[in-house]
């Protein structure tokens, strides 16, 4: 197939490399001319602007957008709407809030432009292992795009989730679960690091990859990190969140679904970014006030 691809960041560059390795004609655009040249070196066709990218694609066009979520994605979609025509397809492969997908699909339908949302998982390892793709939109349009999804995903690594927003909704919950899985590993390994047995944590992580019910790719990455830096002395315990965890909790509140594990994992990330907790200082102050307990 022929596809236009916008956004050549860490994931985007790997994705166009994987597409180019298939049977696809890939036309790329990025604000960075250096990244465009890098993609051209892999066989892609570079474009100096969005308009020039569109001009190099035959109708009906397929445009994959892979830029940061929020304003950058919104601005890119709107810029493409002005350049595309009825029958063309826009794919948002980033981490968009599913409510925005529903709105965009409705707006684009008025212009005859199709919209597909793809939750993309695989990170920087996707080039080698393939990407897990959770796809939402019109089923007939998704079916037409199947050759693209098959190239990007490993075997059985993509599936149609449902109507507009379904792909990003499933990816949102996927990331919420990811937060809690990571938190569980982190707490367990911290506990073992305090053990009186002087345990080799890297060996344990590797061991658990063989036959254990807690084996996972995250555990494999944990083993690698611990082998490289057993005490993690090169890192600070500062953990960002990318937004999907928050959206998951808000959706759970809207639906009256208890998700205490996912919530605790998100809130732990908030705490990791505080050098001094006002709440914990206040706890110390109250203990001193009512019981004369020592403070530091």
Image (cartoon, grey):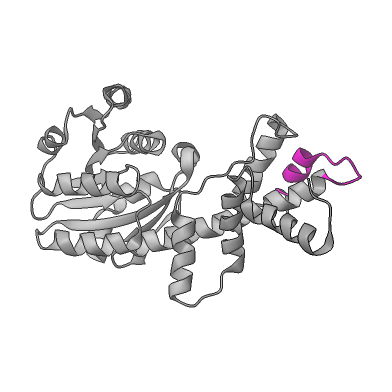
Nearer the observer, 281 or 52: 281
**Left or right, 102 with reference to 190:** left
Position above or below: 80 against 143: above
Q: Residue at x 44, y 68 (%)?
A: 251
Which residue is more in the foreground, 259 or 105?
259
Q: For this view, does 86 lie left or right of residue 200?
A: left
Counting the numbered discs, the total is 0
* Position in image of residue 20 (x %, y %): 31, 34
Question: Is residue 140 something that shows in the picture?
Answer: yes
Q: Is residue 19 left or right of residue 258?
A: left
| Viewer-closest of 98 and 200 | 98
Quadrant in which the N terminus appears: top left
Residue 46's image quarter?
A: top left
- Residue sitting at 62 percent across and 64 percent down? 261
Would you say residue 25 sits in the magenta stretch?
A: no
Left or right of residue 279: residue 131? left
* Quarter of the figure with the C terminus: top right
Which corner quadrant of the image does residue 10 belong to?
A: top left
Bounds of the magenta span? 194-209
Spot the residue most to the right: 196
Asked whether residue 195 is drawn in magenta, I would say yes
Is residue 61 among the parts visible in the rendering? Answer: no
Residue 122: percent from the left, percent from the top?
Answer: 47, 45
Task: Give whichever of 19, 28 is nearer the camera.
Answer: 28
Image quadrant of residue 40?
top left
Q: Position of residue 263 (x, y in %)?
A: 57, 63
The x, y position of residue 93, in whole percent, is 33, 49
What residue do we see at 29% from left, 68% from top? 163
Residue drawn 29% across and 51% down? 92
């Amino acid at each position: 197939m022929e596809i236009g691809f916008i956004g050549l960041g860490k994931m985007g560059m790997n994705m166009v490399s994987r597409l180019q390795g298939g049977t696809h004609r890939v036309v790329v655009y990025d604000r960075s001319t250096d990244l465009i040249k890098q993609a051209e070196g892999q066989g892609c066709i570079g474009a100096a602007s969005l308009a020039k990218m569109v001009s190099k694609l035959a109708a009906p066009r397929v445009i994959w957008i892979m830029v940061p979520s929020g304003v950058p994605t919104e601005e890119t979609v709107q810029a493409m709407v002005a350049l595309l025509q009825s029958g063309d397809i826009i794919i948002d492969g980033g981490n968009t809030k599913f409510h925005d997908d529903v709105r965009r699909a409705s707006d684009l339908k008025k212009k005859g432009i199709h919209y597909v949302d793809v939750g993309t998982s695989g990170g920087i390892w996707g080039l080698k292992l393939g990407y897990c793709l959770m796809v939402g939109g019109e089923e007939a349009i998704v079916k037409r795009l199947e050759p693209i999804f098959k190239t990007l995903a490993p075997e059985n690594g993509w599936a149609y989730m449902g109507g507009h927003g379904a792909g990003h909704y499933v990816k949102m919950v996927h990331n919420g679960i990811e937060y809690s899985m990571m938190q569980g590993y982190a707490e367990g390994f911290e506990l073992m690091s305090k053990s009186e047995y002087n345990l080799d944590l890297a060996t344990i992580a590797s061991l658990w990859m063989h036959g254990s019910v807690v084996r996972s790719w995250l555990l494999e990455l944990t083993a690698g990190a611990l082998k490289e830096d057993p005490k993690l002395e090169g890192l600070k315990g500062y953990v960002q969140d990318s937004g999907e965890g928050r959206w998951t909790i808000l959706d759970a509140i809207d639906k009256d679904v208890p998700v205490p594990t996912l919530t605790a994992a998100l809130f732990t990330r908030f705490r990791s970014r505080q050098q001094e907790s006002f709440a914990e200082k206040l706890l110390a102050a109250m203990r001193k006030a009512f019981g004369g307990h020592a403070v530091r």
